[in-house]
Image: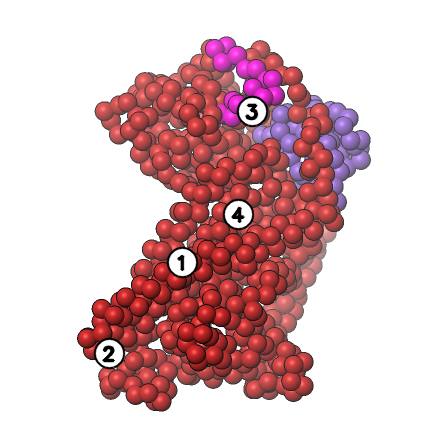
Chain colours: A purple, B red
Amino acid sequence: MQLTEANIGETYIIQDIVTDDEELKSFLFSLGCYSGEPITVISHLKGGCVVSIKDGRYNIDKGIAGSILI
Amino acid sequence: MRIALAGNPNSGKTTMYNALTGRNERVGNWAGVTIGSIESPVKKEYANSSEELILVDLPGAYSMSPFTPEESITSKYVRDENPDVIINIVDATNLSRSLFFTTQLLELGIPVVVALNKSDLNEKQGTNINVKNLSEKLGCPVINTVSTSSDKKGLKDVIEAATKLNGAGQKAPYLQAEIDLNDKHAVEAEDRKRFAFVNDIVKATETRKVLTKEKNKFDKIDAILTNKVAGILIFALVMWGVFWVSQAWLGPLIADWLVAYIEQFQGWVAGLLESSPAIVSALLADGIVGGVGAVIGFLPLVMVMYFLIAMLEDCGYMARVSIVMDPIFKRVGLSGKSVIPFVIGTGCAIPGIMASRTIRDERERRATAMLTPFMPCGAKLPVIALFAGAFFADASWVGPLMYFVGIFLILLGALLVKQITGHKYRKSFFIMEMPEYKLPSLKRATFSMLNRAKAYIIKAATIILVCNAVVQIMQTFNWQFQVVEEGMEDTSILASIASPFAVLLIPLGFGVWQLAAGAITGFIAKENVVGTLAVVYGVTNFIDTDELALVGGAGDVAAIFGLTSVAALAYLMFNLYTPPCFAAIGAMNSEMQSKKWLWAGIGLQLGTGYTVAFLVYQIGTLITTGSLGNGFVPGLIAVLAFAAILTIIVKRSKAKVNSEYALHNKGVEQA
């Protein structure tokens, strides 16, 4: 399923990043957001969600959240 | 020797740079504040080397492969410019991410010193990093630092370690295998190995009590500040507070006191010049001291605003503002990333426009640079304050309204750009690191304020002084270089140059040469609007208009200007929303990198300023007097022509985009 459907506070393992934007994919990679890595949704907001990846917190919009499969 | 500072965004590079060099570069608690490289020698107290140490601050980057335009500056610099040593600033609270970039830097062969910055935050959270172990594993010195502390913990050690390593090489703890860098899968496989290597190091050196994924006490604050309703209301309230304190309360309070001194000084100068020719005394006392004084009088307002904005930038709120505004800006084809340039633009449009560099999408970046000047900047603040005071009895709604109209025009302009560029076929992404909240530093805010004050005074004493002197001379003489006699002011050089422009402004309610001259000099620097009006109307004290009425006896500023309140509001808005000063246009040019966009931007700003002023004056006059203002028909023709041009452009580009996509689809079918 997509990250947009994730339960708050539950840690998931990323299955895949589905996007045709290679630069975005490699940028997410440099943050530690790639398949096999854990990701936790801290909260869902109107335009996206707050996630915890490694030891960082990020706000990502629905477009990015939708491309992260868990 | 040259030392480069490199590291992830918001790890504190510029804060350390400022501490080490004594400079005062822009810092802020969000990712992507620094947008270009800057360099300066290290202060003597940190550099115990006979050789001069040059420190180079670079924009933050997460890896050597750049994502946004400013990140590429960093990878280019460390690759091509061969710094002698790299100080890699690592955010100690996010070791697991930061070391990815560190291991890439260690491969360059340039000696690296790792500064574990923000180590005080780790102590607070009970996170422990074994520095000795980490240093052995990375093969480079690792030093705990706190750049924000008063004792600048570890900074001296970092510079000492860097100096020692000058000329040495660097052994990489992790070397990427020889792969074809164009092969995406091979690159990803290598990067995975690198992260695995980093994870092992982190496991061996770091112990954590608090995990980042756990809820913390700030999550509640975040939930409110990024709530789709409350968050926007709070942002509006915060901005209103900033403008109210700086323009209606504390700012004018200090300004009142300052203006008394300026008037005393002007009186003293006039006294000294009593025996000299009237022209000289008019030029010096009225033109230079009066005009510059009128501008300086507003300095406290600008200073208070800079102080407050610096506090906002420091506490971590800006990132939350861009998050809460993101859905709104997405609708008009921008993203939350554009919010930061707009907020910085309330201080000065130039750094605001430059901040658009962190936006990855070229179209969004150009649109942001084009629209930032609609936010009234610090230089426009005196103009706002002057008109609010003279025509609206310092009503507290005038200032904030100007900013909210600015935001409205930005949204409208963005929508227009979206229509013209056919944005609906493109996707925009928004990702923002959420910095930890911190108490804003009063010291930094004070520095930022004083820095601004210095720049403001220098500008007043140079550009504005010269402009005022020129304006004074031009209005004193006619084309035969004879002194213009009283009652014949319309024959002055200034009047004859400004009059043709004034004709164009009749439909806006302020078609007199004095006001036209103010608007024109405003393109050189917006403070000039105030300076020029002070000179052409012979008024110095714009702050305390009650006192002026008593002293001058000629009535208030409003009477001197001969404007209705509606026309005054139109004039104010015209000056705020027309093209910015030339310096800001220059910044637009360098960020847009396209003459077409630049001219489109200037055209849009001119059209917007004219249309807004026209609507305010004509509709306002209709409401207040029951009939339309002067020159309604020619004005309407101008505004309709502007609207027609925009409609044609939008239609054309839509047709173009449609046909492009139609062709594209046909091509796909055939293939």
* Residue corresponding to mark 1: B258
Query: Quick check: is B131 in the magenta stretch?
Result: yes
- What mark, if any, has residue B278 been given in the picture? 2
Viewer can see residue B191: no
Residue B269 picture quarter: bottom left
* Amino acid type for the residue under numbered disc 1: Leu
- Tally the numbered discs: 4
Tags 3 and 4 on a common chain: yes
- Residue B621 x %, y %: 62, 81
Q: Do the residues labelled 3 and 2 touch (CB within 8 Å)?
A: no
Query: Quick check: is B623 in the magenta stretch?
Result: no
CA gap between label 3 and label 4 equals 25 Å
* Residue corresponding to mark 4: B308
Tags 2 and 1 on a common chain: yes
* Amino acid type for the residue under numbered disc 3: Leu
Q: Which of marks 3 and 4 is nearer the N terminus?
A: 3
- Range shown magenta: B117-134
The structure residue drawn at horizontal position 67% and vertical position 80%, both measured from the top left corner, is B623
Q: Is mark 2 on a helix, strand or loop?
A: helix
